[in-house]
């Protein structure tokens, strides 16, 4: 899909070195029953400011790919690099958000958001205003003193996003973060993450199994084939951008959106039929 390329953001993509580079990546899991090949011949790069949404049939290796980018596991073959350096383990430059956020249930929202800066031994005077800033960014200012177990699913996800962002990660890695939320909360959360992306220029890698969500959020959609996953489509889209830039709220009813969604749905269904 050719999109207009005339803003500072697009030009930046063209000139900037990739933030992430994945080359000829394979991942095998060793299990009691033998070797499971989860990913095969994966090649792609991500530029700063891109919002990548990742689609693919269940079990195709989406979470595995995210875990490699997060540094939880290492590729069996090939490489995954951040700013030209091999990703060797976890660090604060990559923030991770899961479907069920692993938060400290008995701690307050503020204490959870302050966790990263505290661990990094940042002075209290320095991180406290940041905690307030991120509380506000995710719309939780009034809930700062609530304990996590007192929050709804959507609120927990807001805490989880703030907790990742406060560490100023180069990239935010999100694994079906809104998958467990009801439709209304989910829409609110989509709006929030779109706004955060647009205002901060943060690079985001976002896994979803919902084609519409992928199109409403991403600036680029990657589609993985059935297990073992290979990339079978990689398209740039501008629906998300049109929503934030031009305030178009009903873009999913446009012809272009309809056709793109159909194309992706067909491709994903074809994976199940393979
Ligand atoms: N720790 C593990 N040990 C062995 N096999 C694993 C492990 N984790 C994942 N797998 C296998 O690797 C393949 C890819 O799994 P992965 O969780 O990455 O898929 P996914 O695309 O995220 O699926 P879903 O959409 O259901 O979340 C699957 O066949 C899965 O069973
Ligand atoms: Mg998964």
Image (cartoon, rainbow, N blue to C red):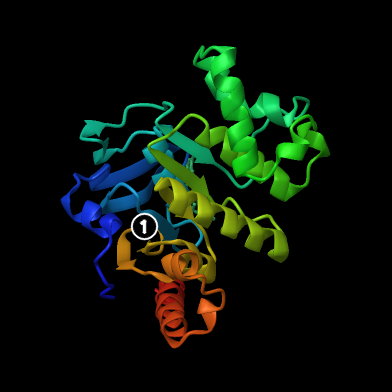
Q: Residue at x 29, y 38 (%)?
A: 76
Q: Residue at x 64, y 34 (%)?
A: 102
| Quadrant of image for the N terminus | bottom left
Quadrant of the rendered structure where residue 227 is?
Answer: bottom left
Instruction: Judge: label 1 CB < 8 Å from ligand 1.
Output: yes
| Quadrant of image for the C terminus | bottom left
Between 83 and 146, the one lying in front of the other is: 146
Looking at the image, which residue sits at the far right?
A: 150
In the rendered view, tell whether residue 13 sits above or below residue 148. below
- x, y percent for residue 11: 21, 57
Q: Residue at x 24, y 35 (%)?
A: 83
Counting labels gives 1
Q: Residue at x 31, y 46 (%)?
A: 48
- x, y percent for residue 168: 45, 32
Side (left or right) of 18 relative to 102: left
* One can see residue 253 in this view: yes
Instruction: Label 1: state its secondary structure.
Output: loop
Dot 1 corresponds to which residue? 229
- x, y percent for residue 109: 71, 31
* One can see residue 101 in this view: no
Side (left or right) of 46 relative to 33: left
Between 273 and 54, the one lying in front of the other is: 54
> What crowding class fits label 1: few (fewer than 14 Cα within 10 Å), some (14-19), or many (20 or more)?
many
Looking at the image, which residue sits at the far bottom?
A: 255
Between 4 and 73, the one lying in front of the other is: 4
Between 39 and 45, the one lying in front of the other is: 45
- x, y percent for residue 2: 25, 75
Side (left or right) of 177 relative to 45: right
């Amino acid at each position: 899909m050719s999109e207009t390329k005339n803003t500072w953001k697009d030009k930046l993509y063209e000139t900037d070195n990739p933030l992430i580079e994945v080359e000829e990546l394979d991942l095998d899991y060793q299990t009691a029953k033998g070797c499971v090949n989860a990913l095969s011949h994966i090649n792609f790069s991500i530029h700063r400011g891109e919002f990548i949404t990742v689609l693919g049939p269940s079990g195709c290796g989406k979470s595995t790919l995210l875990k490699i980018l997060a540094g939880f596991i290492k590729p069996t073959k090939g490489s995954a690099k951040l700013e030209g350096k091999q990703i060797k383990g976890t660090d604060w430059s990559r923030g991770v958000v899961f479907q069920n956020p692993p938060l400290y249930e008995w701690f307050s929202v503020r204490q959870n958001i302050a966790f990263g800066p505290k661990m990094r031994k940042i002075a209290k005077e320095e991180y406290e205003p940041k905690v307030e800033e991120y509380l506000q960014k995710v719309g939780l200012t009034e809930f700062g003193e609530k304990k996590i177990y007192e929050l709804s699913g959507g609120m927990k996800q807001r805490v989880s996003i703030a907790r990742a962002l406060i560490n100023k990660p180069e990239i935010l890695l999100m694994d079906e973060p809104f998958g467990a939320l009801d439709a209304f909360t989910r829409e609110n959360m989509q709006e929030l993450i779109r706004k955060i992306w647009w205002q901060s220029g943060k690079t985001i890698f976002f896994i979803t199994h919902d084609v519409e969500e992928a199109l409403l959020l991403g600036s680029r959609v990657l589609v993985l084939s059935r297990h073992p996953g290979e990339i079978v489509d990689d398209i740039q889209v501008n629906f998300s951008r049109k929503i934030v830039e031009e305030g178009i709220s009903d873009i999913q009813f446009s012809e272009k959106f309809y056709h793109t969604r159909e194309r992706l749905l067909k491709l994903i269904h074809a994976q199940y039929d393979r």
